[in-house]
Image: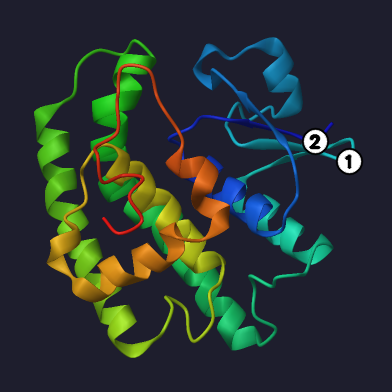
Amino acid sequence: MNRLFHVPLSPFCRKVRLVLAEKKIEVELVEERYWEQDADFLRRNPAGKVPVLKLNGMFLAESQAICEYLDEVEPTPPLMPRNPEERYEVRRLCGWFDDKFHNEVTRNLLYERVNKKITGQGYPESRNVKAGSRAVKVHLDYLHWLLDQRRWLAGDAMTLADFAAAAHLSALDYISDVDWNRSANVKDWYAKIKSRPAFRNILADQVPGFPPPGHYADLDF
């Protein structure tokens, strides 16, 4: 059986879940307490990180590599453009969210508010939370600028870049850390992504001790 070893609020896991659902590839979701460094899990991925996808007997790690592999083996619907310049832009934006956004926003908000409690690492550091709250506004303004020029983040078609961004923002939205009133076009873009069938399982996530806000699963906010 195909399995995805994941953590529900991990944006990297969510990105892979979105691609799997969009491609209609069925998997069993297995929550993995990766921070415990279980020997069986380390055999699946010596880096000790989620997501790990078991697909057709193979163990695949690293979210971007997994997603691009899935797009190659299951090309419909396409999530990577055929044009090299357009592919570059998709990869650039995926890197933006999985690196810059992750380090400036996700790590300072989601990890401080949720991950520390779940993994027993103590209480949120207020300095980091304040830094994340400032940074998310800058990133939302950048998204606004992109969407002022394009239908989707990387161009005229939905791509993996949209899923990468939506994965991070949906995890933050679960803890009410996105001001959707800051930009109408960002809110409209997210509503389009949120309304896709691929998003249904993500909107159904429930993390014990951290109930989502009422608008989280509301397709009309």
User: What quarter of the picture does the C terminus occupy?
Assistant: bottom left
In the image, residue 115 above or below residue 167 = above
Query: Where's residue 155, x and y in %?
Result: 48, 84
In the image, residue 152 above or below residue 76 = below
> Which residue is depicted at the point 57% across and 84% down?
86
Q: What amino acid does circle 2 point to? A: Asn
Dot 1: within a 10 Å radius of its alpha carbon, few (fewer than 14), some, or many (20 or more) residues?
few
> Which residue is depicted at the point 63% across and 12% down?
38
Disc 2 is placed on an element classified as loop
Q: Which mark is residue 2?
A: 2
Measured Cα–Cα span from mark 2 to mark 1: 6 Å
Left or right: 204 as drawn, with respect to 5? left
Query: Where's residue 183, x and y in %?
Result: 18, 70
Query: Where's residue 102, x and y in %?
Result: 36, 48
Disc 1 is placed on an element classified as loop
For the residues bearing labels 2 and 1, Cβ distance under 8 angstroms: yes
**Badge 1 is on which residue?**
56
Give 140 or 38, whichever is nearer the viewer: 140
Q: What amino acid does circle 1 point to? A: Asn
